[in-house]
Amino acid sequence: MNNYEVMFIVDPELGEEKVAATVEKFKSLIESKATLDSFAEWGKRRLAYLIDDKSEGYYVLATMTSAPEFPAELERIFKITEGIMRYLVLRKEG
């Protein structure tokens, strides 16, 4: 089991309900396949640079403990989910 930090940005132009549904989808996915250590919704924030001509995104940060195979599956699902602007999954040492 390894420790991971996951951050993803959801497109706020989807609307509040779809943003909340997307965040809940990934929270449930992580809880079902890994141990969720923390889950923080940072909310709508200004992006450091434009992504698809958008200047804001809805940030979410999670830490989890999982088997080494799960992060690859999580990244695959991020790639095919509409409304995910960016994501990053990092393995934490220790």
Image (cartoon, rainbow, N blue to C red):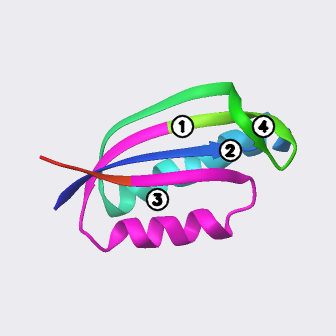
Left or right, residue 72 beside residue 20: left
Query: Closer to the observer: label 1 or label 3?
Result: 1
* Disc 2 to disc 3, C-alpha distance: 16 Å
Q: Residue at x 67, y 46 (%)?
A: 21
Residue 94, numbered circle: none
Residue 60, numbered circle: 1
* Res. 91 image quadrant: bottom left
Q: Residue at x 71, y 41 (%)?
A: 19
Q: Which residues are magenta?
A: 61-89
Residue under label 4, please give it. 12
Badge 4 element: helix
Residue under label 2, please give it. 10
Residue 44 image point, x, y percent: 69, 26
Figure quadrant of the N terminus: bottom left
Q: Earlier in the sequence, mark 1 or mark 4?
A: 4
Query: Closer to the observer: label 2 or label 3?
Result: 2
Category of crowding for the residue at label 2, using alpha-carbon neighbours closer than 10 angstroms: few (below 14), some (14–19), many (at least 20):
many
Q: Are marks 2 and 4 in contact (CB under 8 Å)?
A: yes
